[in-house]
Image (cartoon, rainbow, N blue to C red):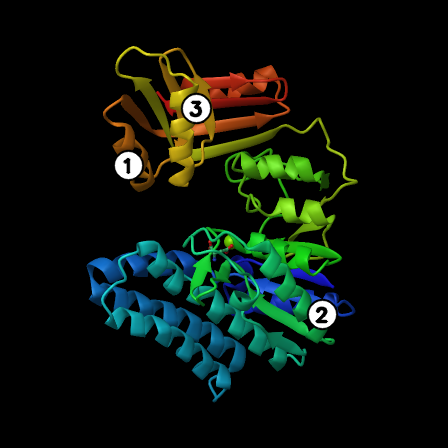
Amino acid sequence: MKVFKFGGFAVSTAANIKNLVNIINMNSTDQLLIIVSAMGKTTDALEKLCLAYLNNRNEAILLLNGIKEFHELIISELFGSEDHPVYDEVANTFIEIEWMLEEEPHPDFDFIYDQIVSIGELVSSKIISAYLAECKLNSKWIDARSYIHTDNSYREGIIDWEKTSASILQLQEHIKNQIIVSQGFIGGTSENFTTTLGREGSDYSAAVFASCIHAESLTVWKDVPGIMNADPALFSSAQKYEELPYSEALELAYYGANIIHPKTIKPLQNAGIPLFVKPFLKPEESGTRIDQSAKLNNNITAIILKKHQILLTISTKDFSYMDEQYLSALLKTFSEAHIKLNMMQLSALSVSVCLDQDEVKLKKVTDLFHDKLLFKADEGLELLTILNFKEDEVQKLSKGKTIMMEQISIKTAQLVMKYL
Ligand code: ASP
Ligand code: MG
């Protein structure tokens, strides 16, 4: 069995969905499991709806109507205007949101978020499954929440691997020459509530399915030629990797290259399943292959620019050293607040960390230590990471910017920068 993952772009218009069917037909001999994201920018729109639900219900209803119209347009282009059961199926899925909007909001925003935002993937997968049937492909829709079991960390559900792999293995026994269609990004708790796995988490879902089902490969269909060494929108000289070892792909994702969800590689590497990143609009092209046998082309420098960064300098108030005791307490709190440290540097009286800008999460840390430690935040910064760098490249890329913090090792250069 092969697993294909189609992201928001691949299901953003009726024309793209027809292209998705062409891609499936090109692979007709293989047993397939398809994981889909929400259509186009639906997840962003549903995020807005969640915020509006707390502040202004009328606005939330207007936003929901916009989302419904966007989906109805795609359905009418795919199925025509006559009576097709998919219209009702989709309307019934959106009703879940309507019901929620009538109730007082649950006190936990992350819980609300997951119950609402997950509807994007549910609707999308229902439309795709129905359209495959319309194209005479034998498809079966399954609810990912019954297979991807998570704890109740809403918005970043942690997978229970034992339960998940047992459920997915069972699935394998029941499918016979059908194309299975399921949702990326979502999972279910033991109390049957919906969780999500973090933004862009559909890649991860596809990797979890692929690894538990012992798939032959996972192909992620994207709106780029493959994995690039830099963002082509920022660097015109960006080039594609033909192949990448797992370790290198993992590093690129870790440093923030916008290619693949950072959690995707590990399950694939552990199970020895190759990952193909292929261009959705040019399916005949080779894309990038990531597996054990791939060689890294050391002549290619990877450039990753992360925006919206904060440099937080944390110092002791009473002139005591920033020692291991302080550090372990701080790290524990960062971890509990789900804050990822993108870079860290230590000095006698302080530690500096570079983080994604998120005031709400950060407040959890600063509140806890405000009596003992001083926090100074520089906002609106960029974090530049260069892998396999050459000295002149570092200079060229940081030209005209103030370097607030830097770290250079044999292979990797990282700079926190600010525009002058
Ligand atoms: N729809 C979700 C998002 O946009 C998950 C995904 O597409 O991977 O973040
Ligand atoms: Mg996506």
Closest to the camera, between mark 1 and mark 3, is 1
Residue type at the position of mark 3 = Val
Tell me if 152 is positioned left or right of 58 in this view: right
Give the CA separation, mark 1 to mark 3. Answer: 22 Å
Q: Residues within 10 Å of mark 2 (few under 14, many from 20)?
A: few
Q: Tell whether label 2 touches label 3 (CB within 8 Å).
A: no
Q: Which of the two labelled residues, at mark 2 and mark 1, occupies the earlier sequence position? A: 2
Identity of the residue drawn at 75% across and 70% down: 28
Q: CA distance from mark 2 to mark 1?
A: 51 Å
- The image quadrant of residue 181 is bottom right
Q: Which mark is residue 25?
A: 2
Residue at image coords 76%, 41%: 292
The amino acid type, in three-letter code, at marker 1 is Lys
Q: Report the residue at 32% width, 33% height from top.
A: 365
Distance between the alpha carbons at the discs numbered 3 and 2: 47 Å
The amino acid type found where label 2 is placed reads Asn
Tag 3 secondary structure: strand
The residue that mark 3 highlights is 416
| Picture residue at 73% right of the left edge, 33% below the top | 296
Residue under numbered circle 1: 363
Which label sits in the foreground, 2 or 1? 1
From this viewpoint, is residue 65 visible? Answer: no
Instruction: Judge the density around disc 1: few (<14), some (14-19), many (≥20) Cα neighbours within 10 Å.
Output: few
Quarter that holds the C terminus: top left
Horizontal relation, residue 199 to residue 106: left or right: right
Does 395 sit above or below residue 190?
above
Residue 245, percent from left and from top: 71, 38
Q: Earlier in the sequence, mark 3 or mark 2?
A: 2
Report the disc number at residue 183: none
Q: Whole-percent x and y of residue 130?
A: 56, 78
